[in-house]
Amino acid sequence: MFMRIDHVGIACHDLEEKIAFFERTFELTVVAREVNEEQGVKEAMLRIADGEGGGSYIQLLEPLGPDTPVGRFLAKRGEGVHHVAFGVPDVEAALGEIGGRGVRLLDEKPRHGSMGSSIAFLHPKDVGGMLTELVQAPPRRL
Ligand code: MC0
């Protein structure tokens, strides 16, 4: 079901400051930036590697406000790993299979994710405390 780790999402207070740190320290490059109003975030994707089914990335996330998933996470836990996202070939099919195995779905239907992907989240309490995202990359994405 999982083809790769698509990205690790990291919550931060200051996106520009954190991008500069990752570029300077790990020699990574930002390949996409987006404001996702529905998810309440401003985000940047830094490419780690390319693969057949899609790439893998570090995703830096700054909340658009305190009353958003990442805003609440920062207030409660501070900066750090917010979620892990796994690449799947078909997010809707994966949701059906995983939901059928008793895991609570935070999204019944896929939503818009970074770089044109379709995404859906699973409840962290049902996945060992890890907020888990499913990602279906668009066909052309590297
Ligand atoms: C909350 N909890 C987490 C967590 N966030 N555990 C692990 N990782 C996280 N990121 C825990 C809390 O500590 C709490 O446990 C319980 O889950 C309920 O959380 P809450 O305090 O009630 O907080 P809420 O109301 O913010 O809800 C958490 C929930 C929410 C995960 C349901 O954040 C959500 O629906 N997230 C999915 C959407 C999302 O995160 N979007 C932003 C990234 P205790 O033990 O205290 O009860 S968007 C994105 O990443 C896009 C752009 C993309 O990848 O393309």
Image (spheres, rainbow, N blue to C red):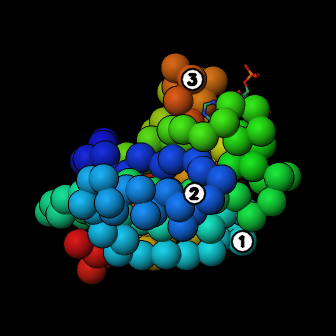
- Residue 136, position in %: x, y? 39, 61
Q: Is residue 8 left or right of residue 121?
A: left
Q: Nearer the viewer, residue 49 or 108?
A: 49
Secondary structure at numbered mark 2 = strand
Give the residue drawn at x 62%, y 74%.
35
Image coordinates for residue 56, horizontal then vertical, percent:
28, 56
Q: Position of residue 26 (x, y in %)?
A: 27, 53
Residue position marked by numbered label 2 in the rendering? 61
Calculate the distance from the C-alpha at mark 2 to the C-alpha at mark 3: 19 Å
- Residue 37 in view (yes/no): yes
Query: Cα distance, mark 3 to mark 1?
Result: 25 Å
- Image position of 6 (left or right of 107): left
Q: Which quarter of the figure has residue 51?
A: bottom left
Measured in 3D between alpha carbons, the distance from the residue under mark 2 to the one under mark 1, in whole angstroms, is 12 Å
The answer to whether the residue bearing label 3 lies less than 8 angstroms from the nearest atom of ligand 1 is yes
- SS label for mark 1: loop
Q: Residue at x 66, y 63 (%)?
A: 41
Residue farthest to the top, as pictured: 128
Of marks 2 and 1, the one in the foreground: 2
Q: Dot 2: within a 10 Å radius of its alpha carbon, few (fewer than 14), some, or many (20 or more) residues?
A: many
> Which residue matches tag 3?
129
- The x, y position of residue 127, in whole percent, is 52, 25
At label 1, which amino acid type do we have? Answer: Glu
What type is the residue that disc 3 sits on? Gly
Q: Which residue is mark 1?
A: 37
Vertical arrangement, residue 66 with respect to residue 28, above or below:
above
Answer above or below: position of 36 versus 73. Answer: below
